[in-house]
Image (cartoon, rainbow, N blue to C red):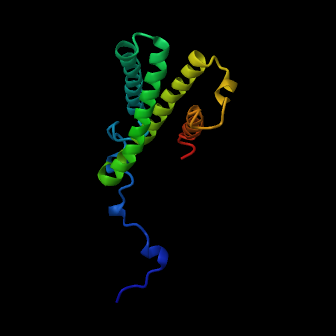
C-alpha cells in the first residue's frame, strides 16, 4: 500500500530532474564558460562588449556621418546600447524556447549591463555635445509629440534603475 504524502512531500522536486544548475557548474574545476561567476568568462565578455561598442562607433564615424566624432559617438553608442539590450530581451525568449540553453542565464544580465553602459555613454555624449549640460532646455514643452526627448528621458531612468540593481547582491 502506498504511503500518504504530505503536500510538501508531494511537491518536492525530484533530485534527478533539477536542471536549474548545470551538472558541470556544481563541480570544482568546471569549464569557465559554464560557470556563471567565472572571472575569465566575465572578462572575455567585457572585452567583446567594449569591442562591439567601439566598432559601432567606428562604423558610424567612417561610413555614416562623414567623420564627425560627436555625432558618431552619440549615434554609435545609442545603436550599440539598443542592440545589446535587444539581445538581452531576446535571450529570455530563446531560453524559453530552448530550455537546455537556460543554463546560460548569466548572458542576459551581461548583455543588459553592457547595453546600459553604452546608453550611459550615449546620454553623456548628448549632454556634452548637443545641450551643453543645460537640462532645462530639454523641457521646452511636455507634449511628447513635439518633444520626443521626453521618451528618451523616461527610458533612461528605467534603464539606469535596472543597471543599478543588476548586481549579485540584488538577485
The location of residue 55, given as percent across then percent down, is 37, 20
- The extreme right residue here reads 136
Front in this rendered view, residue 120 or 26 = 120
Looking at the image, residue 154 sits to the left or right of residue 35; the answer is right
* Residue 109: % across, % down: 45, 40
Query: Where does residue 139 sit, x and y in percent of width and height?
Result: 67, 30
Instruction: Residue at 43%, 22% (x, y): give it.
Output: 76
- The reply to whether residue 55 is in sight is yes
Q: Is residue 103 above or below residue 56?
A: below
In-image side of 16 versus 39 (left or right): left
Q: Which of the pair 107/84 is nearer the observer? A: 84
For this orientation, the residue located farthest to the top is 67
Residue 136 percent coordinates (x, y): 70, 26
The quarter in which the N terminus is drawn is bottom left
Quadrant hosting residue 87: top left
Q: Residue at x 50, y 14 (%)?
A: 70
Q: Is residue 106 left or right of residue 123?
A: left
Q: Residue 27: in sight, yes or no?
A: no
Which residue is at 51% across, 24% downward?
122
Whether residue 100 is situated above or below residue 119 in the rendered picture? below
Q: In percent of the image, x 33 and y 48: which residue is there?
A: 94
Image quarter for residue 68?
Answer: top left
* Near-viewer residue (8 or 118): 118
Q: Quadrant of residue 42?
A: top left
Amino acid at each position: 500500500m502506498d504511503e500518504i504524502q504530505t503536500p510538501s512531500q508531494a511537491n518536492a522536486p525530484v533530485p534527478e530532474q533539477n536542471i536549474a544548475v548545470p551538472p558541470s557548474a556544481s563541480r570544482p574545476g568546471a569549464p569557465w564558460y559554464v560557470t556563471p561567476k567565472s572571472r575569465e568568462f566575465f572578462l572575455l565578455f567585457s572585452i567583446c562588449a567594449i569591442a562591439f561598442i567601439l566598432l559601432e562607433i567606428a562604423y558610424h564615424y567612417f561610413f555614416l556621418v562623414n567623420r564627425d566624432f560627436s555625432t558618431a559617438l552619440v549615434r554609435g553608442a545609442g545603436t550599440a546600447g539598443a542592440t545589446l539590450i535587444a539581445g538581452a530581451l531576446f535571450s529570455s525568449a530563446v531560453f524559453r524556447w530552448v530550455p537546455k540553453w537556460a543554463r546560460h542565464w548569466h548572458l542576459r544580465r551581461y548583455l543588459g549591463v553592457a547595453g546600459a553602459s553604452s546608453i550611459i555613454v550615449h546620454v553623456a555624449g548628448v549632454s556634452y555635445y548637443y545641450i551643453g549640460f543645460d537640462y532645462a532646455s530639454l523641457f521646452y514643452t511636455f507634449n511628447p509629440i513635439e518633444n520626443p526627448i521626453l521618451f528618451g528621458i523616461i527610458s533612461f531612468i528605467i534603464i539606469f534603475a535596472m543597471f543599478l540593481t543588476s548586481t549579485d547582491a540584488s538577485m
